[in-house]
Image (cartoon, rainbow, N blue to C red):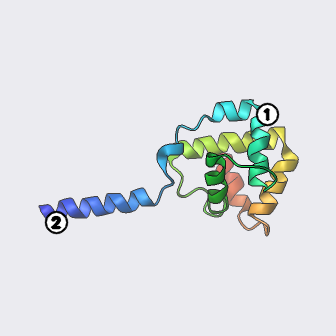
Amino acid sequence: MRVLVVLACLVAATFAAEKYHAKYDNFDVETLIQNDRLLKAYINCFLDRGRCTAEGADFKKALPEAVETTCAKCTDKQKVNIRKVIKAIQEKHPKYWDELVSKNDPTGKYRVNFDKFIQGS
C-alpha cells in the first residue's frame, strides 16, 4: 500500500512540474486589457523596450516556450487569460503583435498552430 501512495505522489509531482506555476492563474487580465497604458507597458517589456514588472518578466521568460508548445505547460485558466491578452493586443495594437510574433517565432514555424490555439481550436 505504501508503494502505491509513494508512486501516486511521484506521478502527481511529475504532472504538477509540467505546468507553469498556478500563482498566475488569478492574474487580473481584465485590468490589463482595459488599461491601454498598462497593456503597452507589458508589450514594451516583452519587446525589450521597457521595464518589466515581476509578473511581466516571468511571462516574458515563458513566452517563447509557450509559443513553441502552444502553451502546453499552461493551466486551463492561464490558457484563457493568454488568449484574452493576445486578442487584445491583436485588436488594439496589431503592429506590436507582429513584432512579438517576429521576436518569439522568427521563422514562423509555430505560427499556424499558435494561431489555432489563440482562436481556441
Q: How many marks?
A: 2
Q: Is residue 61 shown left or right of residue 11? A: right
Q: How many angstroms separate mark 2 from mark 1 (CA)?
A: 53 Å
Percent x, y for residue 106?
A: 79, 67
What residue is shown at x 24% (from left), y 64% (from top)?
7
Q: Amino acid at mark 2?
A: Val
State the residue at coordinates (73%, 59%): 112
Badge 1 marks a residue whose secondary structure is helix
Residue found at x 65% / y 64%: 68
Q: Is residue 58 above or below residue 25?
A: below
Which residue was labeled with disc 1?
36
Q: Residues within 10 Å of mark 1 (few under 14, many from 20)?
A: some
Q: Which residue is mark 2?
A: 3
Q: Residue furthest left?
A: 1
Query: Could you say where residue 103 lies in the image, as x and y percent from the top left?
Result: 79, 62
Position in image of residue 102 (x %, y %) = 81, 61
Q: In the rendering, at what x and y percent does residue 101 appear? A: 78, 57
Give the residue type that dot 1 points to: Asp
Of labels 2 and 1, earlier in sequence is: 2
Quadrant occupied by the N terminus: bottom left
Q: Residue at x 79, y 55 (%)?
A: 47
Q: Quadrant of residue 34?
A: top right
Which label sits in the foreground, 2 or 1? 1
Vertical arrangement, residue 28 with respect to residue 42, above or below: above
The answer to the question of whether label 2 and label 1 lie on touching residues, with beta carbons closer than 8 A, is: no
